[in-house]
Amino acid sequence: MTCKIRLSLALLALGGAAAALLAAGPKDDRAARIERGRYLVNSHGCFDCHSPKTMTPEGPVPDAALELSGHRHDVAVPDAPAAKGPWIVATTGELTAWNGPWGTTFARNLTPDVETGLGSWSEEEFVATIQTGRTRGRGRKLLPPMPIPAFSQIAVDELRDMWAYLQSLPPVKNHVPEPLPPAGTG
Amino acid sequence: MDDTSAMARIDLFTTSHKGLRAALFSVSKQAARADFGQGREAQAVVDAVRRLAAFLADHSQAEETVVAPVLRRLAPSLACSLHDEHVRLAGMERELVRRVERLAAAGPVERLSHGRKLEQQLARLIAEQLRHMEREEVVANRLLWAHLDDDALHALDEQLHATLPAERQVDWLALLLPVVSAPEQARLVERSRACAAVAARVACLALLLLSLLLPALTVACSRADAAPARELPPTLAATGLYADPATKRIADDVLPFVPQYPLWSDGATKRRWIRLPAGSAIDASDPDRWVFPRGTQLWKEFSFGKRVETRYLELGADGEWRFASYLWNADETDAPLAPERGVPGHCESRPGVRYDIPGRLDCAACHRAGDDSVLGFGALQLSPDRDPLAPHAEPQVDGAVDLAELARRGLVRGLPAELLAAPPRIAATTPRERAALGYLHANCGICHNASGPLAALGLELDVRVAPGACDGIAPAIASALGQPSRYHCRETSQRVAPGDPAKSVLTRRMAARDAVAQMPPLGTRVADEAALALLREWIANDLPEHRPTR
C-alpha cells in the first residue's frame, strides 16, 4: 500500500510539474503577441479612422475612453457636400465618416464587444477580412479609405498578433451605422 | 448456439466495441456539458471529437481489411450491407470532423450554433453506431462462429490488431483497459507483450498502470495521424482532366454534367466535369448533403469566347477539400496554377467590364458556406426533371450524367427510392415560381442557408429535396416574404415586399453593383438582368400581400 501511495504521489508531482510547464508557455506567448499587436495596430494608423476624437488646438486627438470603437453611433452625419471638381472625397472632423464615389463609410467598431464590435468574430475571419478585403472574408467589400491594397500584404502572423491585441481591448458598445450606397442608388 | 458456448468463443468485435461505445458516450457527455462560448471548453470538445474520429476510422478500416473479405466469402449480402453501413458511418464521421474544424475556427457566437449542431450530429452517429455494432456482435459473430474454428478466429484477431501501427496500439490500449472486463484486460496485456517496439511496450505497461490508478483515464492523449495533404498540381493537365492535353480530349473516367440552375458568372460559358475514384460511390443517403469519396475531383471551365480559367476542387486523402484555379494562356495551350490570391481584373468579360480570377480564400467563401463544399452537383441540380424556365439553362451535353444515370452506374448509393421514382422538382404554385426558387437556390442559397456561417440571419434561400422537406411553404418564401431586412435600402426594409419588387431588398441588391449593396458580393461585376426580370415578375404576380407566411 505504501508503495502505491508513493507511486501515486510521484505521478501527481510529475503531472503537476508538467502542467506548470505547459501552462507557462501559452500565457507568456499570449502576452507577447498582444504587445506585438499593440505595436502593429499603433504603427499602422488604425486609430486614425477607427477611434473617435476630440478636437484640440493641435487638431483631432483619439478619445482614450473610446479607443478603436469606430464612428460614434450618436453623432448624426448629414448628407456630404456635393463633389466639386477634383474634390471628390469628404470626411468629418473625427475622421470616422467618409464620403466619396463609393458611398458613405463609417469606421467600424474594432473592440471585442459581442453585439457591436468584433466580439463575435473569429481570428480566422479577421485574417481573411484583411487578406481578401471582404467582410469576414466572404461578405461585401471593405470600402475606402480602408487601405486594403497595403494591409493585405501584412504577414499572417502579424495579423494574428493584431487580432490578439484588438481582442484584449475593453469592449465598447457602439453600434456603428451601416455604410450608405452612392447617392441615387440602393 | 447457447450463451455459454458463445462466451467461450473468440469475439472479434465486442472488446473494441466496448471502447468505442465508452468513447462515444464520453464525448457526447463532454459536448453536452460544454459551454461553447468559452474557447477553452470548445477546444477540449474539438480535440475529443478528433480523437474519437481517429479511433472510429482505425476500427472500420481494420474490419474492412481483415473481417470483410471473410464475410464476403461466407455471406455476401451481409458483408455488403455491413460495408454500406461502414461507408455511411464514415460519411457521418467526416461531417463530424468538418463540424469541429468549423467550430475551432469560429467566434463565440458561431461556436454556440456549431456546438448545438455538433451535439445533434453526435447523437445521430451514436444511434447509427450502436445499431451497426449490435449487428456485428450478434449477426456477424453468429456466422463466424458457425464457420470458423478458434484457431482461424485467433488468426483474424491477430490480423485485426496488426493493422494498427505501434503508436496507435498504445492509444487503443489506453482506450480499452479502463472499460473492459478483467479477462479481456489480461488478453490485451498479453498481446501488448508482442508490441514490436520496445518503446511501445514500455508505454503499454505504463498505460496499464495508469489505467489501474486513474479510472478516469478513458481517452488516449495522442492526436490522430492525418494523412498528409498533397500539393496542388502545378498545371491543369497534371490534375488528370485530359486524356490528351494537346487535343484537350477529356479522360475516359471523367464525366461531364450540367446543373439545371447555373450560377451567374457575368455570362461566362461553362463546362463541368467530375471524376470519382475507381470503385467508389457518393453516399446520397442524405439527398441534401452528399458525401463524396476521398479522391473526388471536379472541374469547371470558364470561357468568354475563349478559355479563361478552369476551377478545380479535389477531396484529399485527409478528408479536406482543396480549391484552385488554372489560368489559360492566350493561345489556350497551357493552364498553370493561378496565384493563391487570384488575379483581380484578369480580362474583360464584356467591353469595359473586368473579370476576376478568384483566390483560394474566395473559393472557400462560397464552398465552405454551408454543409456542402460541392456546389451544383446534387440531387436537385442533376434531376432529370429539368426546369425549362431556369435562367440561362444550358442544354445537356453528350455523355453528361444526371441523377438517374449516376444511380444506374452505381455512382450514388443510398439515394431514397422516392427520388428515383419521382425525380426532385421544386414545389411551387407556378412554373415561374419554380424557376425563381431554383435560381435563388443556386445563386444565393450557397451562403443564405440554415447551416452555414450566415445561419443566424434566418434567410434560407436554398431548396431541400429530402422526402418531406418540400412540404408546406418554401423556406425561401417563408424567410423572405414580408420579413424585415437588416439592410436598409431607401424607402424599404423588407427582404421581399409582397407584390412589390421595387421595394424588395432582395431584387434591389441583386441589381446593385456598388460595393455597399451588391449581391452576391463576389464572383460577378454585372447584374443578371434575365434573372432580375424573372424575380421581379415572380414577386409582382406570385407573391401578393395575402400569401401566408410562416
Image (cartoon, coloured by chain):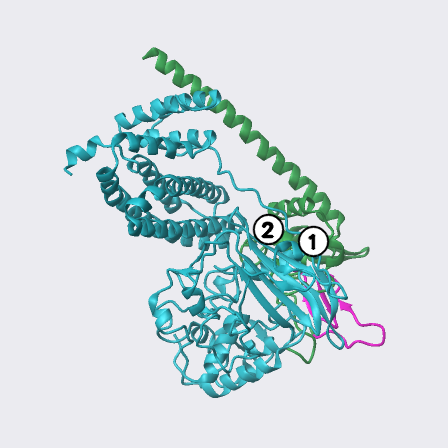
Chain colours: A green, B cyan
B309, above or below B260, in the image: above
Of callouts 1 and 2, the N-terminal one: 1
Q: Is residue B518 visible?
A: no
Residue with the most extreme top position = A2
Secondary-structure class at tag 2: helix
Q: Which residues are magenta?
A: A79-108
In the rendered image, residue A88 lying in the magenta stretch gets the answer yes
Task: Return the residue nearer the eye: B255 or B100.
Answer: B255
Identify the subunit bearing mark 2.
A
Q: Quadrant of the C terminus of chain B?
A: bottom left
| Quadrant of the rendered image containing residue A58 | bottom right
**In this picture, residue B406 sits left or right of residue B416:** right
Mark closer to the observer (1, 2): 2
Q: Are marks 1 and 2 in contact (CB under 8 Å)?
A: no
Residue B467 in percent (x, y) is at 35, 68
Residue pictured at 20% horizontal, 30% vertical = B8
Majority secondary structure in the magenta region: loop
Q: CA distance from mark 1 to mark 2?
A: 29 Å
Residue A113 in percent (x, y) is at 56, 53
Task: Return the residue nearer the eye: B82 or A53.
Answer: B82
B283, above or below A24, in the image: below
Q: Amino acid at mark 2?
A: Glu
Identify the subunit bearing mark 1.
A
What number is the disc on residue B76? none
Q: Which residue is mark 1?
A: A63
Residue A22 in percent (x, y) is at 54, 29
Q: Which residue is mark 2?
A: A124
